[in-house]
Image: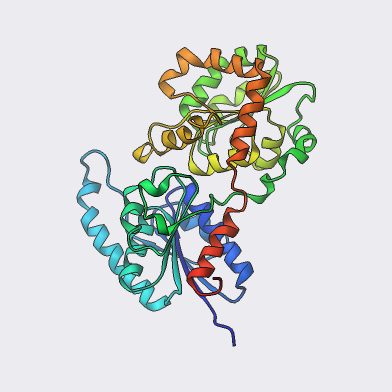
Amino acid sequence: MEKKFKFIISGGGTGGHIYPAVAIANELKVRFPDAEFLFVGAKDKMEMQKVPQAGYKIEGLWISGIQRKLTLQNLAFPLKLVSSLFKSFLIIKRFKPDVVIGTGGFASGAVLKVASMLGVPTLIQEQNSFPGITNKLLAKKAEAICVAYDGMEKFFPTDKIKLTGNPVRQDLIFVDDKRLQGLTYFELNTEMRTLLVLGGSLGARRINQLMEKELDFILQLGIQVVWQCGKLYYDEYKHLNEKENVHVFAFIDRMDFAYAAADFIISRSGASSISELRIVGKPTVLIPSPNVAEDHQTKNAMSLFDNKAAILLKEIELEEKFKHTFADLVSNDELQDKLSKKIHKRALPNATNNIVDEIERLIGIRK
């Protein structure tokens, strides 16, 4: 009789942590149909809704991060940490997992810490080019660390690092074959080139302000626009749909068609976005958010910019540099070609399979 494996997966706080966690679980389920799964997240975070929607059980910990300024929430942190460690202990003792997988977020830190103390094998999936403090601390006891960037030896033990990439939607791998479908889906002019603007599902205020200000300039370049402004900002910008060749959305549900239709992309540089952009391989202008922990987005963007695989504009540079930079990109076929080839060269499209291969090694299935 084959062993029935049990997996605890912990990751959350943002979609960038939740999506990889669910993707890993889905692939494990394909390989081990009889396996049991339990997710662990933070009680008041989005994973408590998103994970059950994906068909998995989840338990919540009372945990949150430390704020940069002194707040009452910070004073409660030690109590939350002790509570989360104790509950993680009870969960692991009861569920008896064969391996614990962490994809980031504060709940992940507590669960992996306790698992290591109890001798349960752990695997870290680090999405960013610059890891957070939690994963740096957990790395010492982890059996494997799956990363998406070269040069992670600066942060983690070399012998534990596996360059796997970040899980991405598989429908993005052959987007070039869907170009006509994409143009039709968004009712675009097939004679014009298309700019896709992405600020994440919630939206990016500064990118939206930039687009509103420079929209006429972009249209004058003969470029039509597909713009995901985010659900928080849609009411503010939906009137711009009245302009010819402008298509504003709160949320884009067919990202494969959006990427397929795009000739140019303006995007934030979260870990998931970077992984998708590498696979899609379109000329891209990255505008990192300066408001994320440890400035991850800027570091992610730099990993492409330093390799001449993307254009990087910081928010403070937009007033001075955007017009010239974007006009130069649109008019320079050689630059477009170089950016496309260099960013696509850095794609890691088989990330989910690669990560699950590592998990199989931990449980003795694969050598």
Is 283 left or right of 124, judged from the image as shown? right
Q: From the viewer's perspective, is residue 132 above or below residue 30?
A: above
85 vs 350, nearest the viewer: 350
Observer able to see residue 348 = yes
Residue at 37% x, 36% y is: 295
Q: Residue at x 61, y 22 (%)?
A: 239
Q: Quadrant of residue 114?
A: bottom left
Q: Is residue 311 left or right of residue 100?
A: right
Q: Quadrant of the N terminus?
A: bottom right
Above or below, 56 against 36 in this view is: above
Which residue is at a point 65% across and 24% down the rendered structure image? 336
Q: Please, is residue 63 above or below residue 311 in the view? A: below
**Residue at x 46%, y 31% (from the top left corner):** 288
Tag count: 0
Is residue 196 at all visible to an observer of this figure?
A: no
Quadrant in the picture for residue 117: bottom left
Q: Residue 194's spot in the image, x, y percent?
A: 69, 25
Q: Is residue 179 above or below residue 215?
A: below
Q: Position of residue 189 (x, y in %)?
A: 77, 24
In this view, the residue in front, 44 or 101, is 101
> What percent of the width, then of the height, locates residue 351?
57, 53
**Quick one: quadrant of the C terminus?**
bottom right
Horizontal and vertical percent for residue 362?
48, 70
Relative depth, front residue between 357 and 217: 357
